[in-house]
Image (cartoon, rainbow, N blue to C red):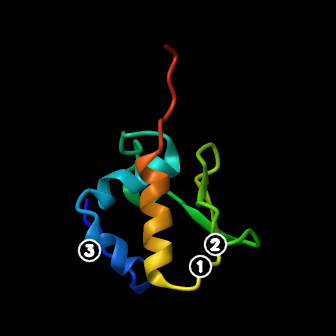
Amino acid sequence: FAFRCSPQWEVTCLNYLTFPLLLPVFLTGSDRIPIYGMSSLRIIIQSTTSGEQYLPVAHTCYNLLDLPKYSSKEILSARLVQAIDHYEGFSLA
């Protein structure tokens, strides 16, 4: 699927080569494309009042991303990449 970076994600997209593949997995909890395609996927990004030291939180059942208000693109990029890097997914083992 085609992935275009909006200005707010620009730093992360440029610095993290696999970002377009890992962000949907982080947000949805699934590495599969929805049966009706990526255009059927509705992702909600909501601002939170937590501080800059907190990482973004994905609520995979609702395709919801809680994103603290960061003061710069660089901090946003670092926190989002850190959250995705530490994502463990679901495991039955």
Q: Earlier in the sequence, mark 2 or mark 1?
A: 2
Of 4 and 51, the residue lying toward us: 51
x and y, in percent, of residue 43 in the image: 55, 61
- Disc 3 and disc 1 in contact, CB within 8 angstroms: no
Q: Earlier in the sequence, mark 3 or mark 1?
A: 3
Q: What residue appears at the point 44 percent right and 52 percent down from the top-left corner?
A: 84
x and y, in percent, of residue 41 in the image: 48, 56
Q: What residue appears at the point 26 percent right and 74 percent down from the top-left corner?
A: 14
Q: Quadrant of the N terminus?
A: bottom left
* Rendered image: mark on residue 14: 3
Q: Measured along the vertical axis of the image, is residue 52 above or below residue 43? A: below
- Mark 3 and mark 1: Cα distance apart in space: 18 Å
Please name the residue that numbered disc 1 is placed on.
70
Q: Measured along the vertical axis of the image, is residue 9 above or below residue 54? A: below
Please name the residue that numbered disc 2 is placed on.
52
- Disc 2 and disc 1 in contact, CB within 8 angstroms: yes
Identify the amino acid type marked 3.
Leu
- Mark 2 and mark 1: Cα distance apart in space: 6 Å
Identify the amino acid type marked 2.
Glu
x and y, in percent, of residue 40 in the image: 46, 56
Of 73 and 42, the residue lying toward us: 73
Of 50 and 26, the residue lying toward us: 50
- Farthest residue in the top direction? 93
Depth check, mark 2 against mark 3: the one in front is: 2
Q: Earlier in the sequence, mark 2 or mark 3?
A: 3
Q: Is 80 left, or right, of 55 in this rendering? A: left
Q: Secondary structure at mark 3?
A: helix
